[in-house]
């Protein structure tokens, strides 16, 4: 991988050599890339380097990733506060994966701030805040943190995959798949190289696809169909949006993570160039934004939703009363953004 120099790998090796215990921390609302990279690194550190490694997540992992998390000893900082605090305080190195700013580890942040252990960052998000990290491996041009970690682990193994655990490789392929929307977004030459090498090493990608896309509960299918049929708004300017309230989510019987990917659906419409999905949760809207090439999801996230991410795949938050007077004002807020962001787009929807 371009930029992954021998000096960086040497610095990483030195950090790892001085730590008997390593705590891996990922971003809040962990997705496939966060869980995949976190578990992959944990298994590598345990099985290859003999470290006492653990994975701390700020809150619950989505049910759709249970095929990865089942049977794994993962610490939830939101529900296991004492255990998370102890794990972080006892660590000789804290590795932050798949987050570009430390505050994105939310429930784990108070424990992190009390620790004086060295801090490692491995991430692919734009505009990383590297201050406070002893070593930052940041590659915003990469498809995923799993892609970066693949090259990091190979470099630590002098270019060989022989000792990297099969579980780690499987987790890397899962994160690579989810963060590219099954290789539909953010795919470069190195992304396909990683996928090819993982398959060549024996990773069963068909098994991963089966878990990700063929194990939905009926509740998820019904909810997604109803949201698309009755709660999808497509504006003449080319922006589409769906708003899911907490009340609606409970009525559908949805589990965490079961709306993941819904934001991509409106982009199947020819005239839609930007899709926004709002999910009410814990007193705010969590925002997912996707766009087609030539339209910046990241700009919308940064300018209007306290967020950021990739050019065509970003996220953020919408709060009330700070941003809007009440949840009922969310639709009008989005439409005001559309009027400013897409004023010259002349799509005519039939």
Image (cartoon, rainbow, N blue to C red):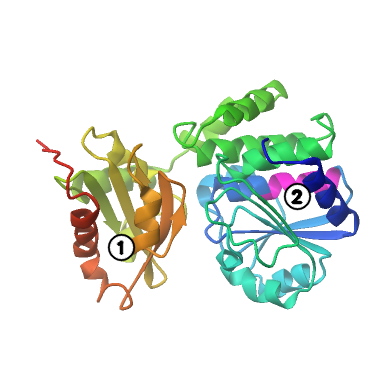
Q: Residues within 10 Å of mark 2 (few under 14, many from 20)?
A: many
Q: Is residue 46 magenta?
A: yes
Mark 2 lies on residue: 42
Left/right of residue 89 with respect to residue 221 in the rendered view: right
Corner quadrant of residue 174: top right
In x, y percent, where is residue 317? 40, 64
What's the residue at 81%, 66% (across, down)? 91
**Helix or strand or loop: what does disc 1 sit on?**
loop
What's the residue at 54%, 30% (across, down)? 188
Q: Which mark is residue 245?
A: 1
In x, y percent, where is residue 224? 32, 45
Left/right of residue 197 with respect to residue 12 in the rendered view: left
Corner quadrant of residue 110: bottom right
Q: Quadrant of the C terminus?
A: top left
Q: Who is closer to the viewer here, 323 or 346?
A: 346
Q: Is residue 98 magenta?
A: no
What's the residue at 34%, 65% (across, down)? 246
Left/right of residue 151 with respect to residue 193 in the rendered view: right
Q: Who is closer to the viewer here, 32 or 344?
A: 344
Label 1 or label 2, whichever lies nearer to me, is 2
Left/right of residue 71 with respect to residue 255 in the rendered view: right
Magenta span: 38-47
Q: Which mark is residue 119?
A: none
In x, y percent, where is residue 192? 58, 26
Q: Who is closer to the viewer here, 160 or 263?
A: 160
What's the residue at 63%, 23% (across, down)? 196
In x, y percent, where is residue 203? 67, 27
């Amino acid at each position: 991988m371009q930029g992954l120099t021998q000096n960086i790998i040497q610095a990483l090796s030195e950090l790892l050599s001085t730590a008997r215990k390593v705590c891996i921390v990922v971003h809040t609302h962990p997705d496939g890339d966060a869980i995949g990279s976190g578990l992959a690194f944990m298994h590598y550190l345990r099985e290859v380097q003999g470290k006492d490694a653990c994975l701390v997540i700020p809150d619950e992992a989505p049910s759709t990733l249970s095929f990865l998390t089942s049977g794994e000893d993962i610490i939830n900082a939101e529900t296991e506060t004492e255990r998370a605090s102890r794990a972080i305080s006892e660590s000789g190195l804290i590795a932050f994966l798949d987050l570009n700013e430390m505050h994105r580890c939310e429930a784990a942040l108070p424990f992190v701030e009390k620790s004086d252990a060295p801090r490692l960052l491995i991430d692919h998000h734009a505009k990383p805040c590297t201050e406070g990290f002893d070593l930052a491996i940041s590659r915003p041009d990469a498809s995923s943190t799993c892609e970066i970690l693949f090259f990091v682990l190979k470099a630590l193994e002098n270019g060989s995959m022989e000792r990297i655990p099969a579980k780690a490789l499987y987790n890397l392929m899962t994160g690579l798949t989810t963060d590219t929307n099954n290789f539909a977004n953010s795919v470069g030459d190195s992304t396909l190289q990683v996928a090819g090498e993982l398959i060549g090493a024996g990773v069963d990608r068909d098994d991963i696809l089966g878990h990700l896309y063929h194990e939905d509960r009926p509740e998820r299918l019904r909810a997604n169909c109803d949201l698309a049929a009755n709660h999808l708004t497509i504006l003449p300017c080319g922006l589409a949006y769906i708003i899911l309230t907490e009340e609606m989510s409970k009525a559908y019987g949805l589990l965490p993570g079961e709306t993941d990917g819904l934001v991509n659906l409106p982009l199947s419409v020819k005239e839609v160039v930007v899709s926004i999905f709002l999910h009410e949760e814990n007193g705010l809207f969590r925002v997912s934004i996707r766009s087609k090439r030539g339209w910046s999801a990241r700009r919308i996230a940064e300018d209007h939703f306290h967020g950021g991410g990739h050019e065509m795949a970003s996220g953020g938050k919408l709060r009330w009363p700070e941003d809007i007077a009440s949840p009922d004002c969310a639709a009008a807020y989005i439409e005001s953004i559309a009027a400013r962001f897409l004023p010259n787009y002349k799509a005519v929807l039939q």
